[in-house]
Image (cartoon, coloured by chain):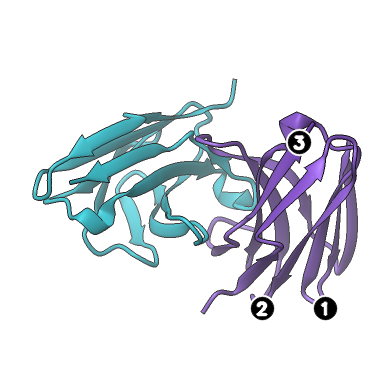
Amino acid sequence: KTQVEQSPQSLVVRQGENCVLQCNYSVTPDNHLRWFKQDTGKGLVSLTVLVDQKDKTSNGRYSATLDKDAKHSTLHITATLLDDTATYICVVGDRGSALGRLHFGAGTQLIVIP
Amino acid sequence: DMKVTQMPRYLIKRMGENVLLECGQDMSHETMYWYRQDPGLGLQLIYISYDVDSNSEGDIPKGYRVSRKKREHFSLILDSAKTNQTSVYFCASSLHRSGNTLYFGEGSRLIVV
């Protein structure tokens, strides 16, 4: 059973618009949550990691929230650029060390058009 | 420059042939991983290696084996490839004590015909 659900599956926005990607999970325990960006044909690159019970992070035009009570995270992208076109993957870790397991969502495919 | 390197990037094999996918990292990370990524699914863990000759099965190890003789190298081997092993394979590495930080390679796309 999928333990990390991402929505929407795909999203098309115009350059300059903002967008919000959602991640709901049932992983227990939930030590941390990380968002990755995956360009087509490339590996995953970390955008941000959230750790606290209610956490917020900001990394340039990317900002993210985590609510462990609701087991829910959002990734906000502000003023999208064409280079933001990619798949965004939510990953929940059940421990803070490599002894833990990582649970991957299937990703949201974002397409930014001119 | 922190990097995970995978070779080959693209590979076409016939059913029943052997496949060797190689992964290297230059960060002295203890832990290395092999995942596969299929359309519509999250990455699935095949094997994890905690250090040289210290390997554990992941969630989908059947049909695969691994080898780690040096800390910087981790190989994935398919003995007698099957068509359902057509996929994109990703190698990753992390420090043992902070497994929440992962560095990924760019993937190896395997097609089995």
Label 3 neighbour load within 10 Å: few <14, some 14-19, many 20+:
some
Q: Which chain is home to disc 1?
A: A
Q: Are marks 3 and 1 in contact (CB under 8 Å)?
A: no
Q: Which label's residue is closer to the chain start, 2 or 1?
A: 2
Q: Amino acid at mark 1?
A: Ala
User: Is residue B30 visible in the rendered structure shown here?
Assistant: no
Q: Which tag is nearer the camera, tag 3 or tag 2?
A: 3
Q: Which label's residue is closer to the chain start, 3 or 1?
A: 1
Q: Which residue is mark 3?
A: A113
Residue B75 drawn above or below residue B35: above
Q: Which residue is mark 2?
A: A26
B33 sits to left or right of A81? left
Residue displayed at 65% across by 69% down: A5
Q: Amino acid at mark 3?
A: Ile
Residue displayed at 54% across by 38% down: A43
Q: Which chain is home to disc 2?
A: A
A37 sits to left or right of A80? left
Give the quarter of the figure containing the N terminus of chain B.
top right
Shade of chain B as shown in the rendered figure:
cyan
How much space separates mark 3 and mark 1, taking CA atoms?
Answer: 33 Å
Q: Which tag is nearer the camera, tag 3 or tag 1?
A: 3
Q: Secondary structure at mark 3?
A: strand
A16 sits to left or right of B100? right
Q: Residue furthest top?
A: B1
How much space separates mark 2 and mark 1, taking CA atoms?
Answer: 10 Å
Q: Which residue is mark 1?
A: A70
